[in-house]
């Protein structure tokens, strides 16, 4: 476990933390310019999330899919790929889980849910796998393919819902069968009817899986080698193309599972989308703030979820438009990307202990 | 200012990095109009020291005086202000920009606040160029001029900013012999015009040729400062590596046995359909070193790629111990008993962001004991890495250190350790000593000979004629994708090889 601590060394934790603080400060300045009280805004944001069990449970619900799409983006990134298509993979995961949850009947309670989850994961994986395959075999840039596939997924899933799963007279699918639900009734009751589900547990396990697979397994070693230096990986006899497809597939499974949880645990149906849900795109931000490390992503998804969910309370309590929170999140990403600024802020600290650079 | 006052004086500079003391109380005096060579092995601490002088690092202890005044150099801007300029080993130029645009970058001359006034700069650059005999065209684009010219642009850049003290970091590493002698001329001209130069290098020949004073650094400490006129290459080499170094490779006559590698009629076309390997034939036997001599770009890289499975050949046969390995994948070829020291260690040899430990099992990670049921066996990997690092004297703070932070020589040692330890039948060594200092070169060449003595077949590809002649048991000359002749090293000389490399087919010896 020494590696966990090394990655979470003071230094690597410091940059995102300072970036978060700076992001909040930027948000505060903008609120001041707009004539709002930032202290009241932030305090009502946090008291919304931590003020009662229902809202806390709902914040956890908000966090769960962000963990999954964050892991998806980070996983591909570790293999040297930019999976901007987590959005589409997430939608495909939703759609497959809906289809299985609605159309498949006669399965026992746990089995049906498991089959639906697996279907969602596979759908996301295959969707991302298309990108990986085209990149590996044809050399097409993965960013371009996955952006196009995001739109394809959006309209494809709307078509599926409208043609096969539609609840009569509504802009959404039928309810999934009770056997396919992954909601946790007693926990929801405990949390004052917040929508708690098993997906949250699986999301945490997924982060652990990510860590073990990437840094402890033979296949993870290959993925990282390919990600850092494809030429050296080829020299070492690794199948670079296979690894690209594999990395995209696993990445897509994460996103697809995130979609499946949302249908099976939260909504229990799927709406016809008027626009992209955005959870996959938020995953890019989550991965960035989490420094592409699974445990960092657990933290950053929590932050992201708390800010997003709490922003509603902010508009109630302080009259601040919830969009301000997107400015805060945007600023945090900016400060993480522009680490030089953060290091400049930290410079007094750095003068004391210099880092190893060139020997 | 007193004439005897040094233009730069370093006093007891100490710089520590985690796990290593890069500079240990180093003192050095640079006098006006002097070329002061800083000699040391890769990783001895030369670059760290110069980065301190140029303001990129701060010393932990000690101080710097410029013209007798104590100064605090906390940024490159400050260094430039003090008249210190650095010509980096890797040029920092914008390719599509012109020479002038590159030189003024960061201090563009402005007219009325916004309009860029290049005319005066062009004139100023032209004047500087003429004054020092640089012959640079201020309006040429960087992408259109040679590497040697680009280096002169770097020199001009420092002069334009008013540098009186120039630091050259390994300036000849990227130059052709012709360009090197031209650079020597320029450096002499610079000191004649009153500039002072610090020359960082590990090439003894250049030091003897051009420097006035030489300071030798080993493992972060100053070993000695000598007048160049009062020393010789052997003494310098000995002080640099800490023991006596022989420039001759010590080896017994070869006793070649059965053929290990047989290549017949190998043809490989590049993307444009031009045959870069054109019916190439060669064989290497167990217990011998076959050296491939040739000018860069005559198919050497393609030959290596074909032999190691990195690219597919269009025609011909490659046999290893009688078994066909033509167009097999790299892993198959590795497992058949081929080890490969690649010509570009950063591109192929190492994953720079992996730890040393991870790099040491790059080709064997999937085998027992490193792979246990799909999981990496960290303790077995670390044990192997520690063993190789100790046995081959790879200097690294720890096995967890990233390969990127090691010096070139130590990176190369690590690769050689890994490749030799696989106990191959055929060892392909492509430019194994490129960019290394004499101590490391000696080490690498000894390892190649040791492999031969253990009955391995060794294929050595090198652009250094000295290396080919000293190390090989048999020399094959490659020209335009073909082997145009074979000679024995004891029966040939530079001139004959040079002619063959230029394409004349008068093969001497036992062709």
Image (spheres, rainbow, N blue to C red):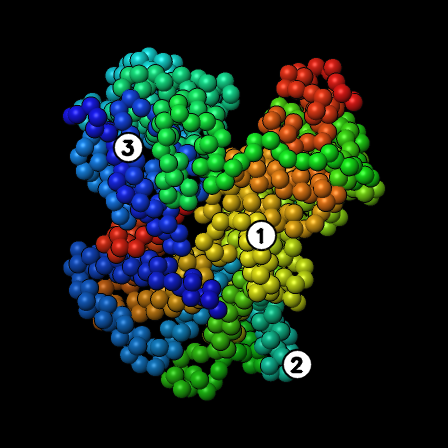
Q: Residue B29: give x, y in percent of width and height.
A: 28, 32
Secondary structure under the numbered disc 3 in the rendered image? strand
Q: Quadrant of residue B257?
A: top right
Q: Give the secondary structure at mark 1.
A: helix
Residue shown at the point (23%, 59%) measured from the top left: A25
Is residue B400 shown left or right of residue A9?
A: right
Give how far across and how far down residue B125 sits, in percent. 30, 17
- Residue in the foreground of this view, choosing between B339 and B107: B339
Within 10 angstroms of label 3, few (less than 14), some, or many (20 or more) residues?
Answer: some
Q: Which mark is residue A106?
A: 2
The answer to whether residue B261 is seen in the rendering is no
Label 2: chain letter: A
Query: Under tag 2, what secondary structure?
Result: loop
Q: Quadrant of the N terminus of chain B?
A: top left
| Of the pair B407 and A235, the residue shown nearer to us | B407
The disc placed on residue B391 is 1
Residues at discs 1 and 2 both on one chain: no
Question: How far apart are the alpha carbons under marks 1 and 3?
Answer: 38 Å
Q: Do pointers 3 and 2 mark residues of a single chain? A: no
Disc nearer the start of the sequence (1/3): 3
Residue wearing tag 3: B29
Horizontally, is B123 left or right of A93 in the view? left
**Count of numbered circles in the view:** 3
**Neighbour tally class for label 2: few under 14, some 14-19, many 20 plus, Cα within 10 Å:** few
Q: Residue at x 65, y 24 (%)?
A: B294
Could you tell me how far apart the alpha carbons at marks 3 and 2 are, in whole angstroms?
Answer: 88 Å
Observer able to see residue B370: yes
Q: Nearer the viewer, mark 1 or mark 2?
A: 1
Rendered view: B448 above or below A304: above
Tag 1–tag 3 contact (CB < 8 Å): no
Residue drawn at x 52%, y 49% is: B394
């Amino acid at each position: 476990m020494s590696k966990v601590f090394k990655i979470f060394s003071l230094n690597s934790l410091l940059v995102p933390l300072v970036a978060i603080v700076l992001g909040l400060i930027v948000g505060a300045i903008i609120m001041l310019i707009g004539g709002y009280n930032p202290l009241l805004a932030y305090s009502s944001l946090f008291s919304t999330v931590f003020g009662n069990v229902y809202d806390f449970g709902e914040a956890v619900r908000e966090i769960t899919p962000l963990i999954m799409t964050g892991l998806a983006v980070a996983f591909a990134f570790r293999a040297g790929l930019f999976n901007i298509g987590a959005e589409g993979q997430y939608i495909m995961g939703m759609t497959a889980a809906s289809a299985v949850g609605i159309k498949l009947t006669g399965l026992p309670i746990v089995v049906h849910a498991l089959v639906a989850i697996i279907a969602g994961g596979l759908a996301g994986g295959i969707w991302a796998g298309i990108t990986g395959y085209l990149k590996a075999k044809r050399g097409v840039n993965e960013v371009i393919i996955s952006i196009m596939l995001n739109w394809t997924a959006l309209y494809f899933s709307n078509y599926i819902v409208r043609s096969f799963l539609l609840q009569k007279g509504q802009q959404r699918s039928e309810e999934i069968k009770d056997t396919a639900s992954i909601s946790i009734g007693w926990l929801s009751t405990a949390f004052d009817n917040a929508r708690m589900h098993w997906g949250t547990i699986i999301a945490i396990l997924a982060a652990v899986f990510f860590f073990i697979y990437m840094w402890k397994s033979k296949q993870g070693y290959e993925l990282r080698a390919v990600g850092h230096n494809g030429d050296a990986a080829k020299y070492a006899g690794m199948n670079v193309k296979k690894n690209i497809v594999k990395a995209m597939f696993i990445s897509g499974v994460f996103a697809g599972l995130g979609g499946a949880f949302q249908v099976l645990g939260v909504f229990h149906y799927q709406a016809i989308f008027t626009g992209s849900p955005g959870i996959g795109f938020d995953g890019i931000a989550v991965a960035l703030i989490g420094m592409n490390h699974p445990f960092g992503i657990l933290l950053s998804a929590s932050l992201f979820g708390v800010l997003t969910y709490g922003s509603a309370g902010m508009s109630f309590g302080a009259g601040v438009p919830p969009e301000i929170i997107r400015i805060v999140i945007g600023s945090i990403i900016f400060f993480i990307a522009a680490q030089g600024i953060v290091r400049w802020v930290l410079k007094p600290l750095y003068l004391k202990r210099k880092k190893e650079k060139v020997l | 200012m007193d004439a005897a006052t040094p233009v730069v004086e370093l006093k007891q500079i100490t710089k520590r990095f985690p796990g290593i003391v890069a500079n240990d109380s180093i003192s050095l005096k640079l006098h006006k109009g002097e070329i002061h060579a800083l000699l040391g092995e890769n990783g001895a601490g030369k670059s760290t020291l110069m980065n301190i002088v140029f303001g990129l690092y701060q010393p932990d202890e000690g101080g710097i005086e410029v013209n007798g005044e104590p100064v605090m150099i906390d940024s490159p801007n400050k260094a430039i202000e003090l008249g210190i300029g650095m010509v980096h080993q890797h040029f920092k130029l914008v390719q599509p920009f012109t020479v002038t645009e590159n030189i003024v970058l960061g201090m563009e001359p402005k007219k009325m606040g916004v309009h860029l006034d290049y005319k005066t700069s062009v004139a100023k650059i032209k004047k500087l160029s003429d004054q020092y005999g640089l012959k640079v065209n201020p309006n040429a684009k960087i992408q259109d001029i040679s590497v040697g010219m680009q280096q002169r642009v770097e020199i001009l850049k420092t002069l334009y900013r008013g540098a009186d003290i120039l630091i050259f970091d390994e300036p000849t590493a990227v130059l052709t012999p012709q360009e090197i002698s031209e650079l020597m001329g320029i450096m002499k001209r610079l000191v004649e015009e009153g500039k002072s130069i610090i020359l960082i290098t590990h090439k003894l020949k250049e030091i003897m040729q051009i420097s006035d004073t030489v300071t030798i650094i080993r493992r972060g400490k100053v070993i000695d400062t000598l007048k160049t006129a009062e020393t010789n290459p052997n003494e310098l080499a000995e002080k640099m590596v800490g023991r006596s170094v022989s420039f001759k490779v010590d080896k017994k006559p070869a006793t070649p046995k059965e053929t290990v590698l047989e290549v017949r009629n190998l043809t490989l076309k590049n993307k444009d359909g031009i045959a870069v390997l054109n019916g190439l034939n060669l064989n290497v036997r167990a217990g011998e070193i076959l050296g491939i001599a040739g000018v860069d770009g005559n198919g050497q890289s393609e030959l290596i790629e074909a032999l190691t499975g990195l690219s597919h050949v269009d025609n011909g046969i490659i046999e290893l111990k009688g078994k066909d390995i033509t167009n097999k994948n790299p892993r198959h070829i590795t497992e058949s008993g081929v080890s490969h020291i690649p010509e570009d260690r950063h591109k192929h040899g190492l994953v720079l962001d992996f730890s040393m430990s991870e790099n040491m099992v790059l080709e064997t990670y999937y085998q027992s004991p490193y792979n246990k049921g799909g999981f990496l066996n960290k303790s077995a990997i670390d044990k192997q890495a520690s063993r190789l690092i100790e046995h081959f004297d790879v200097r690294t703070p720890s096995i967890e250190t990233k390969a990127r932070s090691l010096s070139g020589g130590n990176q190369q040692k690590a690769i050689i350790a890994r490749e030799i330890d696989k106990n191959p039948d055929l060892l392909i060594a492509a430019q194994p000593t490129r960019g290394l200092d004499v101590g490391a070169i000696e080490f690498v060449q000894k390892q190649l000979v040791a492999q031969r003595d253990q009955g391995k077949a060794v294929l050595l590809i090198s652009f250094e004629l000295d290396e080919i002649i000293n190390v090989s048991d048999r020399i094959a000359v490659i020209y335009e994708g073909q082997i145009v002749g074979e000679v024995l090293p004891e029966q040939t000389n530079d001139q004959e090889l040079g002619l063959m490399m230029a394409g004349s087919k008068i093969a001497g010896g036992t062709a």
